[in-house]
Image (spheres, rainbow, N blue to C red):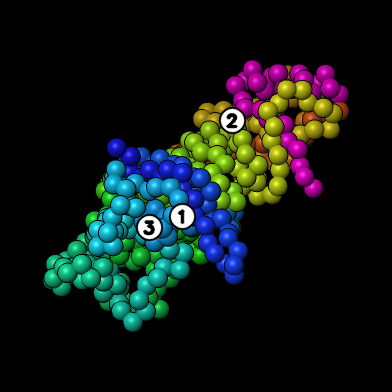
Amino acid sequence: MAAVEIKNLTKNFDIEGHTVTALSNVSLTIEKGDIFGVIGMSGAGKSTLVRSINFLEKPTDGSVYIDGVDLGTLSERELRRMRSRIGMIFQNFNLLEQKNVIDNVCFPLEINGTKRKEAKKRALELLGLVKLEDKAKAYPSQLSGGQKQRVAIARALATDPQLLLCDEATSALDPQTTGSILELIREINEKLGITVVIITHQMSVVTDICKKVAIIDNGRLVEEGLVEEIFSAPKSDAARELLSGKKVSYKPLEKLEEGRRIRIVFRENSAYEPVIANLILKLQIPINILKAETQNVGGRAVGEMILGLPDNSNQQEDIILELKNAGLTVTEVHENE
C-alpha cells in the first residue's frame, strides 16, 4: 500500500471575487519509505500541494489517501489523530521563542496528553538523533539556522510520524548547512523508515536526496519519475528550466542544424572519463565546451555538458554518432534569449 495517493486533486481559491486555481487535476503516488521530491518555481502550487496532503488545505475536488484512508471522509477529530502521524517542517522553523529547545520538542507530546516525564525522555532521545543534546536548555535565539532546523525536525518526529513533510526546509540555509540537514533527513529515512516528501524550488536538493520527483508548473503536474531519468532527459519546459536555472528547451535530437548546441549526460564511470578529449583526438574536430559539471544524483555520479559544435554539418553528425555510440544521452539545446 502506498504511503500517499493523490487523485485528481484540484484546489481553487476565491480572491476578491475571482477564482484562482492553485492546483489542477494533480495525481501522485508516493510509496512507503520513499524520499519523494516535489519541485517547481515560486507560485507553481507546490506548497498548496503539501498542505493538501495533511488536509490543512481541503481540496476543491479530488481525494487524498494516507495509508489507504481517504482524508475527505474523516471527522475533524479523526483528522487531528491522522495529522499526529504526519510530521511537518518549514522554511522559517516555526519554533516557540519563549520555550527552550527541549520544551519545543516536548510541545506536541504534551498537546497529545503525554506525561511530562515521558515527553522529556522522548525529547532527549530525539535531540540525540539530531545531534543537539548539548542544546537542550538553549533558546531558539541562541541557535544557528541549521540548529533551529534540527530542533524543528526533532519536534516533527516527537509523535512517531510515518510521514514527514518538508516545505522548503532548506531554503533559508547556506549550502553547507543545507547539505548537513539533507544528510540528517536521509539518515532518519533509513533508520526509522519514515516516508519523506520534500517540497523545494532547488533542483540541487532533489538531485542530492530524492529518489523520485514530481514537477509542478502553474498548478499542473507536468512531469514525474525517477530523478536520474528526469535529469538525463527532461521532457517538460519546467524541468529544463529548473535544471538549467534559466529558460531553455531541450528537444530529442534527430538532425542537428549548424550553429546548434547539444546537451550530453553521462553517468557512473563515464562521468570521470575524458569523453570529449578522446572524441577530439579520434575525429580531429574542435568542440567547444560551454558548460560542464558532475553532480551527485541519487548517490550516483552524473555528468552534464553543453557543447558547441563546428559549423560543418557532416562533422556535427560524426560527433553526435560517436557520443551516442558511447552510450551517452544527447539532446539538442534551443535557448530562448
Residue topped by disc 3:
55
The nearer-to-camera label among 3 and 2 is 3
**Which comes before the other along the chain, label 2 or label 1?**
1
Q: Check contact, mark 3 vs mark 2: CB within 8 A.
A: no
Q: Which region is colored magenta?
A: 312-337
Residue topped by disc 1:
60
Horizontal and vertical percent for residue 329? 62, 27
Circle 3 packing at 10 Å, graded few (<14), some (14-19), many (20+), is some
Taking depth in this image into account, of 301 and 103 the one nearest to the observer is: 103
Among all residues in the image, which is located at the extreme front?
17
Question: Mark 3: which amino acid?
Answer: Phe
Can residue 199 be seen here? The reply is no
Taking depth in this image into account, of 102 and 108 the one nearest to the observer is: 108
Residue topped by disc 2:
266
Circle 1 packing at 10 Å, graded few (<14), some (14-19), many (20+), is some
Circle 2 packing at 10 Å, graded few (<14), some (14-19), many (20+), is many
Question: Mark 2: which amino acid?
Answer: Phe
The nearer-to-camera label among 2 and 1 is 1
Disc 1 is placed on an element classified as loop
Identify the mark at residue 219; answer none if there is no mark.
none
Is residue 28 depicted above or below 173 in this figure? above
**Which comes before the other along the chain, label 3 or label 1?**
3
Left or right: 119 as drawn, with respect to 154: left
Q: Which residue sits at x=65%, y=50%?
A: 245
Disc 3 is placed on an element classified as loop
Q: Which residue sits at x=42%, y=60%?
A: 57
Q: Which residue sits at x=49%, y=36%?
A: 225
Q: Check contact, mark 2 vs mark 1: CB within 8 A.
A: no
